[in-house]
Image (cartoon, rainbow, N blue to C red):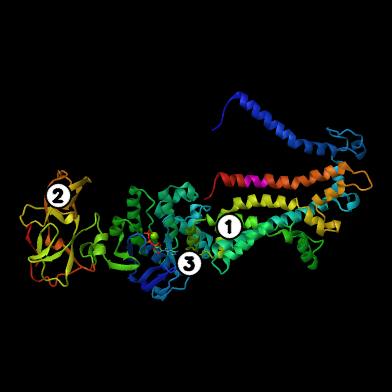
Amino acid sequence: MRYRRPGLDLLSHALLLLSIAMFLFPVWMALTAATHTRAELYTGIAPLWFGGEGIDNFIAVLRDPVGRLGVSVSQLLFNSLVMALGIAVGKIVIAILAAYAVVFFRFRGRMLCFWAIFVTLMLPVEVRIMPTYQVVSDLGLLNSYAGLILPLIASATATFLFRQFYLTVPPELLEAARVDGAGPWKFLCDILLPLSKTNVAALFVIMFLYGWNQYLWPLMITTDTAYTTAVVSLKQMATGGDNLVPWQTVMATALLALLPPVAVIVTMQRYFVKGLVDSEK
Amino acid sequence: MATLTLDALNKRYPNGNAALLGIDLSVEDGEMIVIVGPSGCGKSTLLRCLAGLETISEGELKIDGERVNEREPAERDIAMVFQNYALYPHMSVAENMAYALKNRGVPKPAREAKVRETARVLGLEALLDRRPRQLSGGQRQRVAMGRAIVREPKVFLFDEPLSNLDAALRVQMRLEIRRLQKRLGTTAIYVTHDQVEAMTLADRLVVMNAGRVEQIGTPMTLYQRPATRFVAGFIGSPAMNFLPLEQGAAGWRLPGGACLELEGFEGRPSSLGVRPEHLRESDAETALFDVRVELIEPLGADTLAYCRLDGTATPLVVRLDGARQLDEGERLRLDAGIDRLHLFDAEGRRLERRSLDHGRAPLLPLSASL
Ligand SMILES: Nc1ncnc2c1ncn2[C@@H]1O[C@H](COP(=O)(O)OP(=O)(O)OP(=O)(O)O)[C@@H](O)[C@H]1O
Ligand SMILES: [Mg+2]
């Protein structure tokens, strides 16, 4: 039920506007700063309106190598995208298969497998970073996409979520499918996956953001800037060393780095809101 | 189009629970077999063993004379209708029905033609594009039937397919299932809890009890000549009355004092069974039962009277004509035709009369009361 009172309406709108302003203010600052020259930004007053550069700074960072990094932001974004997509897709595929095995197949050590997966929840990459680094380095995967993706690709959380979902699927559905001549693969692809597309969409968003925002791991294993990700490079750009920090470049890069996650959320949100509204089960 | 042979089928679940104990059954081509029995007696287990959803522990299952114990459900060419329908929620009605055909590699045009034909038979044409959740219970049931029929399987398996429907729809679907099964001539095994479904659908009825078959026969055989006390009590509603028999000086004594002379029977009777609908009022001095009415249930056409034998606590249910005005506490004298009485020995086996040539039965009520 909802309260309908004019005064309350006004108050809630005011609160909403205030929070929007609070969240958008930094973005606004970044946007306006990115349209100034460096000289203008070092006059002391933060400009809260657009400067004369327009989108030139954006074009420049996308096209030309940035500062000490020696690679363009396009390259950085591409690296980030490969890593985030690799991690998100990998996690989902592996989680679907692992949960499928644990829920629908009877084999020796099934529960052991499940608990082993579950326990890895307690071992995020930050905890196991030294041994993981050793392994990746021994495999010769430093400075490679595989090295960026593989150590982060298994997800106990996602496996657990899919397991919980599979447990709610009525067993008769599996039996009906077996009678209808669907083998294990067909059952997975024709029945389970379509039923879990909402979960897949939600997890994809979460896992994409997780991958996109990785900092420590990419920082460790990429010495070659050709494999650096956008998030890592932002930090490097912002600590200027001897020179003055080129804030207009940093801000342009930051805004560009914001776009893919926003795009993913906006696209995927439609799917899982739809999924939540007309639940298939 | 198939025969089905079950030879000493046993099922033991992994937890050691023996759910089926030596089931023998042979089903003719085109026959409709209905399986009934109390909850937990193994009806669903049997059906699932036939479908291949559970492994058979011992014994042999043959379809058309071929052993199929080790075959996957799809390879057995059976179709199953589940109690909760188990339709694929994300597929349209048409896709649900076509799925099995698709898995068999039937080309799309043929598939669509078959689905349309089946939908026409079942009156589902208007619903083909809907999802299961956009259908009523009865429509879902129909789609589940359609999904089974469209494949033209050798055997239909039904596990309480109508138990989620309301009474009126159940009657309608019951008739429809019978009509379809007859028309298609497909062998069918049907599990139900419902007496009426069992009696009306079955070519032959199988009564199961605790993992065993108690009796197999036409519904009328099971009703008229139940082989065991269990079957006698299970078939028919309200259930048959059972009265203990004691041997006395003048014959076999019933509770309440009536005496019966029982001759020409194999074995030693221990209980007498009589159906509520076979008891009728009688003025005769020789009436079998003197009863006091305790409770009345008017059903319209009939009235059920729950009575006790006079002076005892032995209950007796009588079905009387609906027009008969009854009062609680009223006394009735009841009698039943001699051939309506069933005798069972201490193990619950039916006792048959040794010969029927002697004309009128050797079973005679001696005196109504002492
Ligand atoms: N997966 C299982 N593991 C162990 N025991 C089981 C399993 N499934 C059923 N049983 C047992 O096997 C027996 C027969 O069960 P089944 O489901 O065949 O009964 P049913 O006759 O279909 O009963 P209902 O009329 O209630 O559906 C029961 O005692 C039940 O507890
Ligand atoms: Mg059952």
Q: Main secondary structure of the magenta part?
A: helix
Residue B122 in magenta stretch: no
Whether pointer 2 and pointer 1 mark residues with C-beta atoms closer than 8 Å, the reply is: no
Q: What SS does tag 1 mark?
A: helix
Amino acid type of the residue tagged 1 in the rendering? Arg
Amino acid type of the residue tagged 2 in the rendering? Arg
Residue at 39% x, 72% y is: B10
Q: Considering depth in this image, is A232 or B150 the residue closer to the camera?
A: A232
**Name of the residue lying farthest toward the right:** A242
Q: Tell me the mark number nearer the camera, choosing from 2 and 3.
A: 2
User: Tag 1: Cα neighbours inside 10 Å, few (<14), some, or many (≥20)?
Assistant: many
Q: Name the chain under label 1.
A: A
Q: Which mark is residue B185?
A: none
Whether pointer 2 and pointer 3 mark residues with C-beta atoms closer than 8 Å, the reply is: no
* Residue at numbered disc 1: A163
Residue A269 in magenta stretch: yes
* Residue at numbered disc 2: B292
Magenta segment boundaries in residue numbering: A267-271
Q: Considering depth in this image, is A45 or B84 the residue closer to the camera?
A: A45
